[in-house]
Image (tube, helix red, strand yellow):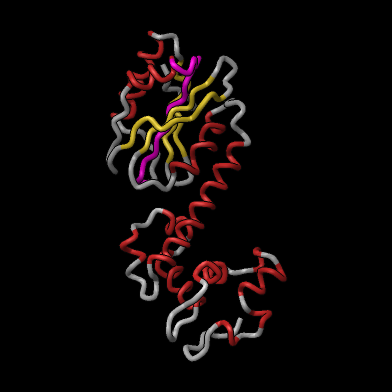
Amino acid sequence: MPSSDNSSGIKSWPQADRPREKLLKSGERSLSDSELLAILLRTGMKGTSAIDLARKILDKFGTYRNMSHTDIREWKQIKGLGSAKIAQIKAALEIGRRFREDEADKTREKISAAADAAKIVMPQLRDLKTELFKVIFLDNGNGIIEIADVACGTVDRAMPIVREIIHAALQKFAASIICAHNHPSGDPKPSQEDATFTRELSLAGKMMQIRLLDHIIIGDGKYYSFADEGRME
């Protein structure tokens, strides 16, 4: 790739080296991270090409995952990034997140183990800055009826309401449920509050003939399963 030159933009490069032309000729997998970002940015600023601007973004955030849940104020600290460019990048990141969810959807027919449930909710929960509780509602054959958000909390904790979860399960004619939430710290080790909640939800479910099969805590690329650890009553 030609070296960055503040006096010339991407248009002055040989066509084979321009990111857009390179993508159309050789495919998107042939592009570097900075080249992909440059296509989204379209233009740079005076004295700075789109490639240079893309490199500044990557230098600041490091990875696409870090970009996906970063406050807008941090983006605006990068000189040359206006609201339109930020919106374009954020939209592309969200498309990527939804693509991962679509891939997970293919496995949603049936839950056979904690790993199945973790695989489904991991893309949705692992990068959140606050705790979010989800419930997977299952039929008699452990087939998924629905996956729903039930509570959103602060960075420290969420406040799921046991009664509302059980009520929702009854409305959906669910035979069993799996509860899942994230730890923004990245460490999936359960707290005492997590253990207490699991016990209370399990007891409430038994009273209404709805089994709590598992409570899964999502960390940074890893998870904790109460069922796998033998902690389900």
Q: Is residue 195 left or right of residue 141?
A: left
- The answer to which quarter of the image holds residue 134 is top left
Location of the C terminus by quadrant is: top left
Q: Nearer the viewer, residue 98 or 177?
A: 98
Please identify the residue farthest to the right as the structure is shown: 25
> Residues in magenta?
171-185
Residue at x-position 33% and y-position 26% = 195
Percent from the top left, x then y, of residue 122? Answer: 49, 41
- The answer to which quarter of the image holds residue 132 is top left
Percent from the top left, x then y, of residue 117? Answer: 52, 32
Above or below: residue 175 compared with residue 97? above
Is 226 magenta? The answer is: no
Q: Is residue 174 left or right of residue 69?
A: right
Q: Is residue 130 left or right of residue 139?
A: left
Is 180 magenta? The answer is: yes
Residue at x-position 31% and y-position 62% = 73
Please identify the residue farthest to the bottom as the structure is shown: 7
Location of the N terminus by quadrant is: bottom right
Residue at x-position 58% and y-position 42% = 102
